[in-house]
Amino acid sequence: MAGEVEVVRVAAFDIIKMEDKEWDGPKRDDDVLSYTAKINGCSLTVIKNGNVVFDSDYNKGAQIRIVEDVVHLPEGAFGT
């Protein structure tokens, strides 16, 4: 729809960058690794083939899930 911005929710990756002190985890459930934002403004960068496909921030309580080389991102990302 016109005026809507598409936000990445699922992405394949080579590298994920996150600050250790901002994220709690990993917690394993079979083949799923989960990380939970510990504070507001937790930064997350997802890189595939040397290109940044996602670079944004989450507030406390947001949870990402990783299965092999795919990251599942929650709603609520903000920033650049």
Image: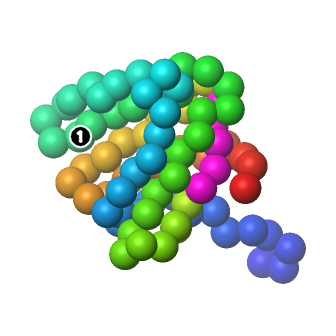
Between 6 and 57, the one lying in front of the other is: 57
Q: Is mark 1 on a helix, strand or loop?
A: strand
- Image quarter of the N terminus: bottom right
Tell me where residue 5 sits by quadrant: bottom right
Image quarter of the C terminus: bottom right
Judge whether residue 36 can be spotted in this image.
Answer: no
Residue bearing the label numbered 1: 32
Name the amino acid, label 1.
Answer: Val
Residue 80, above or below 59: below
Q: In this view, does 51 lie to the left or right of 41?
A: left
Q: Is residue 33 left or right of residue 71?
A: left
* Residue at the outermost right position: 3
Query: Who is closer to the viewer here, 48 or 37?
Result: 48
Left or right position of 66 against 11: left
Q: Position of residue 20 (x, y in %)?
A: 43, 27
Point 64% across, 42% down: residue: 57
Tell me which segment is drawn in magenta: 55-59
Q: Residue at x 68, y 32 (%)?
A: 41
Report the coloring of the rendering. Answer: rainbow
Whether residue 21 is situated above or below residue 57 in the rendered picture: above
Q: Report if residue 58 lies within the magenta region.
A: yes
What secondary structure prevails in the magenta region? strand
Relative to 66, 17 lies left or right: right
x, y percent for residue 13? 35, 63
Residue appearing at x 59%, y 40% in the figure: 43
Q: Residue furthest bottom?
A: 2
Does 38 appear above or below 70? Answer: above
Q: Answer yes or no: is residue 68 visible.
A: yes
Q: Does the magenta stretch include residue 8?
A: no
Residue 2 picture location, percent across and down: 84, 79
